[in-house]
Amino acid sequence: MHMARTATTALSSVLALIMPAAIAFKGMADTRPGEAGTRTEETVAYAGEIRAHAVRGTRRTPTGQRRKIRVARDALEGQAATFVAAGLTEQRYEAAARASRSSSQARTAALERQRAERRAQRREAARRQLEAAGPAGWIRACLRVTGVPGHWYGGLWTIARRESGFDPHAFNGWDANAASGEPSRGLFQTTWPTFRAHHQSGTSWDINDPVANCAAAVNYIKSQYGDIARVQQANGSSAPKGY
């Protein structure tokens, strides 16, 4: 019995010496080097995460240490040259874009000038053609745009001869209309209120245009008399009288 207690006490003493050493040994990191010139992996627990660190031999990388990277001067000069080239390229692009915009604006302005010139040429050609047509052409065109019967032609011819002497630019500044502030104008001597109220769609708004002036006079006659046969001024056998 005594010997058993002695053996137990001795075993407890030995375990008391061995356990701390074992615990300390277990807590140490495995820093055993592998073969010469190779690396081993060390697993380190830090802030609840498992990170793998490569170490050479038993040497550890100090925490927070940053590795310094050296860049050759030639590489830096090459990058600088690249940045400079990129900057120049951007400048050239902006210059080309400005030149393109300016060229486009110039082409647009030139095209607009050409269109304006062509419009002016067409108007001038139409005016000359209209003048060349003379009273007969004006009245026939008036009949077409207003749609009145052909027997109106003689009466309209008589009115135009008596009112303006076939002058599309005739101006009366002395009669009662002129005294009231609305002088008679054009081939059929219409006032502006009458011309505006009886203007024929599709004709000019120029009161001196002979076709437009005639068409307004025709529409006025239709509204006031119904037919040209009832207009004394259109009858060459009757004395002249305003209509």
Image (cartoon, rainbow, N blue to C red):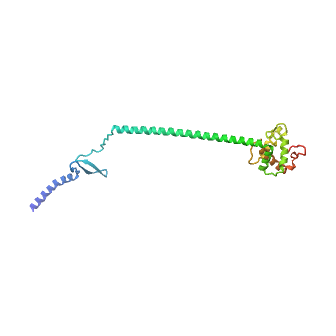
- x, y percentage for residue 192? 78, 42
Hey, which residue is sitting farthest bottom in the picture?
A: 1
Hey, which residue is sitting farthest front in the picture?
A: 132
Q: Residue at x 87, y 50 (%)?
A: 229
Q: Residue at x 12, y 57 (%)?
A: 10
Q: Please name whichever residue, 60 or 175, is drawn nearer the observer in this view of the structure.
A: 175
Q: Residue at x 13, y 58 (%)?
A: 11
Q: Please name whichever residue, 76 or 10, is drawn nearer the observer in this view of the structure.
A: 76
Q: Quadrant of residue 123?
A: top right
Q: Is residue 209 visible?
A: no
Q: How many marks?
A: 0
- x, y percentage for residue 89? 46, 39
Q: Quadrant of residue 204?
A: top right
Tell me if 109 is positioned left or right of 145 in this view.
left
Hey, which residue is sitting farthest left in the picture?
A: 3
- x, y percentage for residue 61? 27, 45
Hey, which residue is sitting farthest right in the picture?
A: 238
- x, y percentage for residue 47? 31, 50
Q: Quadrant of residue 122?
A: top right
Figure quadrant of the C terminus:
top right
Q: Residue at x 72, y 42 (%)?
A: 125
Tell me if 49 is positioned left or right of 188 in this view.
left
Q: Please name whichever residue, 54 or 194, is drawn nearer the observer in this view of the structure.
A: 194
Figure quadrant of the N terminus:
bottom left
Q: Is residue 118 visible?
A: yes
For residue 77, above or below residue 156: above
